[in-house]
Amino acid sequence: MAESKPQPKVKKKAVPMPKQPPEVRRHNFNEVALGYTEEQALEEASRCLQCPKPQCVKGCPVEIDIPAFIKLLREGKYEEGIRKIKEKNSLPAICGRVCPQEEQCQKMCVLGKVGDPVSIGRLERFLADWERARGFTIPEKAPPTGKRVAVIGAGPAGLTVAADLAKLGHEVVIFEALHLPGGVLVYGIPEFRLPKSIVQAEVNYIKKLGVELKLGYLIGRTYTIPELLKERDFDAVFIGTGAGLPQFLGLPGENLGGIYSANEFLIRVNLMKAYAFPEYDTPIRIGRRVAVIGGGNVAMDAARSALRLGAEQVYIVYRRSREEMPARKEEIENAEEEGVIFKLLTNPTQFIGDEKGWVKQMECIRMGLGPPDETGRRRPVPIKGSEFLMDVDTVIIAIGRTPNPIIQRTTEGLAVTKWGTIVADENGKTSLEGVYAGGDIVTGEATVISAMGAGKRAARAIHEYLMSKK
Ligand code: FAD
Ligand code: SF4
């Protein structure tokens, strides 16, 4: 009998990510995850099997050649490794931090069947941070095509489409309503998960590609889309305006003082730097007891920000069980380690105010779980007579966001769904010639990488459209 070839031993456990200890980090806004050292990155990279048919790539929405960049990393060729990633992804330091890799590339990694999958996101972050520390190299661009593209919104979808089109030789101008570029990356995701200097550095890289950034331009008001195309000489437009309008519960007492939408709360904390008050003049009244309603990433970010602002007790109030929580597992664990208290299978029914009109209590009801609903998750069902009161000083509502309707209302002929999202095909083509859209404005709330994937596909389609135009 032929002897079987000895298999190389693979370490089942991933190299853990170094983090600030929970008792320290709950008092500061510095980044929680500290990133791999070079030794740790090399050790983790050595776990990759370099599969001939890599499943991980199938799980990556922008199809990064994952085994190739990991091979380059473990050979110490960091410059080539980051180039390999950047062939497909212009924002690796961001994706390495906030992408739900556990649901994408890492979920597909074969090592996940016998132990921990390769920590692809942490390795991506290592290379991106290595490059940022040394300064970016700007890739070669195609010669100018003489075509002009307007990109609306400087979130991950808009930044990606702009970078790809600039590399293809087109003149690109981004119009952004806020005073800072980055979209949710700057106004939503807190500093302790994604430092703003990293977003700024990646935006600077995109500017170095020749993209012009116009801040404080609300399209639909400053210019409309027909004006951009007919009067301002743009040959195509990409709409990447996201889903920034908060949803509310519609409960009695919801407009009492001390009740915020997660959007308003996080904008105050992140964009207007309320955490650095009085250095920055945005005050925020947080109180001792804070309840955050919702179970997604936005709810975790709001709860962890509230803790850092000095709240003594912070609750996540979620109507389903932990299993159905849409937030990243890692972020749920981080929140729990920091002391956030989870009140699961619980839903608010009304808010009660004091004589000055500030919220002081929240009436809640306990929930059971029925059969799955249209989302595939078990439907929460109120348990009659189980109402109880919770004392609260602040309530933050984080139950979802919808698109801002300004562009849809000012663009005749643009097809829109009943949820207010823009109708576009898989390449971002809308019902209007030369007008493309992608990211949350098309899908509704999704992820950074799905917005970037949409931006990439739209860039290819816009390029084809422009080159086919006489
Ligand atoms: P956005 O990021 O929303 O950017 C849209 C931009 O368009 C904004 O800058 C906006 O100001 C601008 N704009 C809007 N209207 C106009 C107009 N009329 N004219 C000019 N500019 C306009 N995803 C993950 O993958 N991982 C996470 O951990 C994660 N955490 C999140 C935490 C929070 C708090 C939030 C709110 C979202 C989170 N997400 C996360 C979701 C993710 O950030 C979004 O899916 C992603 O940012 C969508 O990108 P986008 O480019 O489509 O839109
Ligand atoms: Fe490496 Fe996992 Fe991808 Fe295989 S599936 S190439 S082990 S990262």
Image (cartoon, rainbow, N blue to C red):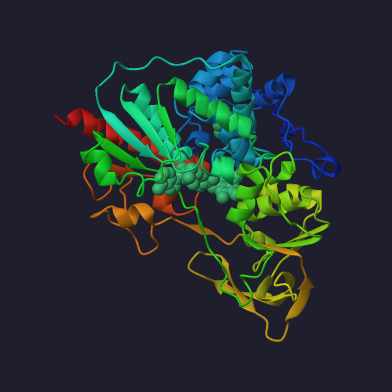
Q: Position of residue 35 (x, y in %)?
A: 70, 29
Q: Quadrant of ligand 2?
A: top right
Give the residue at the far right of this rendering: 23
Q: Nearer the viewer, residue 265 or 257?
A: 257
Image height check: is 352 above or below 310?
Answer: below
Position of the C terminus, as image quadrant, is top left
Residue 103 visible in the snapshot: no
Position of the N terminus, as image quadrant, is top right
Q: Position of residue 380 (x, y in %)?
A: 61, 73
Image height check: is 196 above or below 417?
Answer: above
User: Number of numbered discs present?
Assistant: 0
Q: Nearer the viewer, residue 54 or 18?
A: 18
Q: Quadrant of residue 364?
A: bottom right
Going by the image, does 36 lie left or right of 158? right
Image height check: is 122 above or below 362?
Answer: above
Q: Position of residue 231 (x, y in %)?
A: 22, 38
Q: Nearer the viewer, residue 256 or 460?
A: 256
Give the residue at the far left of this rendering: 470
Going by the image, does 50 lie left or right of 195? left
Going by the image, does 236 lie left or right of 246? left
Identify the residue at image location x=65%, y=31%. 122
Residue 112 visible in the snapshot: yes
Q: Quadrant of residue 279?
A: top right
Identify the residue at image location x=75%, y=75%. 354
